[in-house]
Image (spheres, helix red, strand yellow):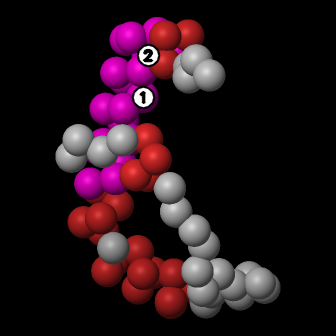
Amino acid sequence: MCWEFMDTGYFTANARIKQVELSQETNDNLTAWNEGDMMLYNQFNKSLWRKMEESGFERMKLKL
């Protein structure tokens, strides 16, 4: 995507102050509805950690 580090900033909007306990049915529905997203996230997360391990964690640290 050719993004610079500063392009990845974010701010929190509409954040809940109090966490709400979800029912098991709601939790199951959300898991089912987001299955594709979860699979995609898990795939990229695994490849990220694999590449970081291959490159060496020390090399991956930011040098400020």
Q: Is residue 22 left or right of residue 60?
A: right
Q: What label sits on residue 49 in the rendered view?
A: 1
State the residue lying farthest toward the left.
1
Residue 2: horizontal and vertical position, in percent? 23, 41
Q: Quadrant of residue 46?
A: top left
Q: What label sits on residue 28 in the rendered view?
A: none
How many numbered badges does the structure rendering display? 2
Asked if residue 21 can be seen in this view, the reply is no
Please say whether residue 15 is one of the residues in the magenta stretch: no
Of the pair 11 and 15, the residue shown nearer to us: 11
Residue at horizontal 37 percent and vertical 23 percent from the top: 50
Q: Residues within 10 Å of mark 2 (few under 14, many from 20)?
A: few
Residue 52: horizontal and vertical position, in percent? 42, 21
Q: Secondary structure at mark 2?
A: helix
Q: Is residue 17 left or right of residue 12?
A: right
SS assignment for the magenta stretch, majority: helix
| For the residues bearing labels 2 and 1, Cβ distance under 8 angstroms | yes
Look at the picture and state if 23 lies above or below 3: below
Q: Which residues are magenta?
A: 40-57
Q: Amino acid at mark 2?
A: Glu
Q: Circle 2 sits on which residue?
A: 53
Residue 22: horizontal and vertical position, in percent? 62, 86
Q: Is residue 63 left or right of residue 48?
A: right
Residue 19: horizontal and vertical position, in percent? 74, 82
Q: Secondary structure at mark 1?
A: helix
Q: Amino acid at mark 1?
A: Trp
